[in-house]
Amino acid sequence: MSKLSLFLCLIFFHSVSSISALELQNLKPEFHNPRIPKSTLSSSKKFEGSSDLVNLRYHMGPVLSSPINTYIIWYGKWLPSQKLIIKDFLLSISSSTNHRTSPFPSISQWWKTASLYSDQTNSNVSSTVLIAGEYVDSKYSQGKHLTRLTIQHVIGNAVKTAPFPVDHKNGIYLILTSDDVTMQDFCRAVCGFHYFTFPSIVGYTLPYAWVGNSGKQCAEVCAYPFAVPGYMAGGGPSALKPPNGDVGIDGMISVIGHELAELSSNPLINAWYAGEDPTAPTEIGDLCEGLYGTGGGGGYIGQVMKDRVGRSFNLYGRRGRKFLVQWIWSPVLQACAGPNALDLKP
Ligand SMILES: *[C@@H]1O[C@H](CO)[C@@H](O)[C@H](O)[C@H]1NC(C)=O
């Protein structure tokens, strides 16, 4: 090929593809597997992806098999830019809307592990996750401290407010609280949780998940590994740079991924979990906390990528977004899994 035709060819390639030069460069990222001691929350769990200790079982209940209609409740003060990062993550999950636009390894490929879970009707967790509605509770209707009980009133208010519907067939409710909202057990025992609403409060049994912005409360616990406990400062391993430049929001992304995977495979706490105690089930996200790539465990987070400005991520999303999302337990491999596994090149 002559220099001129190569040049024309490059121009042609550039104009037909939507991939910018910057993104192309980012497709050849650097790899690293940093060693960062686990956050205090996950270090209490002794699994680290070892199948010997895991007895994940199916308890006969349904999984979320119809297209999952997500209703977001923005509680407190949210910047449009923060909402956009979270919505881009959610909209990156569906293979139908996103598969062709995100490069490997993508968020929708990551969700394939969740879709391996099925129920006694042979229905699998849906590969379609949609944003069906949004509700803004910027006036803190239940105050700046929430509990597992008052959060149900937040959902109740939202579903009673038209046009936010009661979608008791395919709906899940995702309550996201801003960094000035505290929650019962937040930081001490949980970074997020999922459960279902009580008909006495909300009118229906609706699966929901809550995730809070830990940025100003306990980033070293809930926005791991973008923040590390203070005692490790100086000489110890340092925190990773968040892919979207926001420690609190980038930290929420992995927790939202964790809760969505669990909500979908165990929406009524009677489908997929390990352990004998349904009041403290160990679910498909819990089993893989702190693992983001091959070679994780023992303090290593696993092989992840670093972009040109040193921000760490393991998955691509829509519109050129990058995210760092923990792996989830695969019932097929009997191990934690993600599409960025080193033995899984496309
Ligand atoms: C559905 O679940 C079954 C059983 O877990 C699995 O073998 C199959 O691959 C899943 N299908 C999809 C499309 O993921």
Image (cartoon, rainbow, N blue to C red):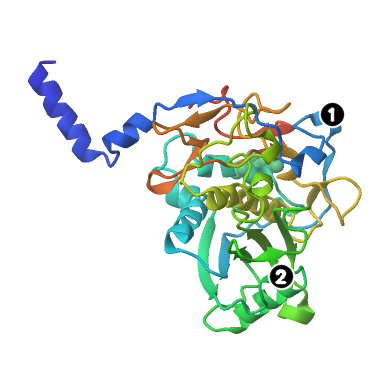
Percent of width and height locating residue 186: 73, 58
- The answer to which image quadrant residue 182 occupies is bottom right
Residue for point 54% across, 48% down: 247
Q: Secondary structure at mark 1?
A: helix
Percent of width and height locating residue 212: 63, 59
Residue labelled with disc 1: 52
Q: Secondary structure at mark 2?
A: strand
Tag 1: amino acid = Asp
Could you give the CA–CA distance between mark 1 and mark 2, rounded to whole angstroms?
38 Å
Percent of width and height locating residue 54: 83, 36
Residue labelled with disc 2: 146
The answer to whether the residues at label 1 and label 2 have Cβ atoms under 8 Å apart is no
Residue for point 70% across, 70% down: 145
Q: What crowding class fits label 1: few (fewer than 14 Cα within 10 Å), some (14-19), or many (20 or more)? A: few
The residue positioned farthest toward the left in the image shown: 4
Tag 2: amino acid = Leu
Circle nearer the viewer, 1 or 2 = 2
Nearer the N terminus, badge 1 or badge 2?
1
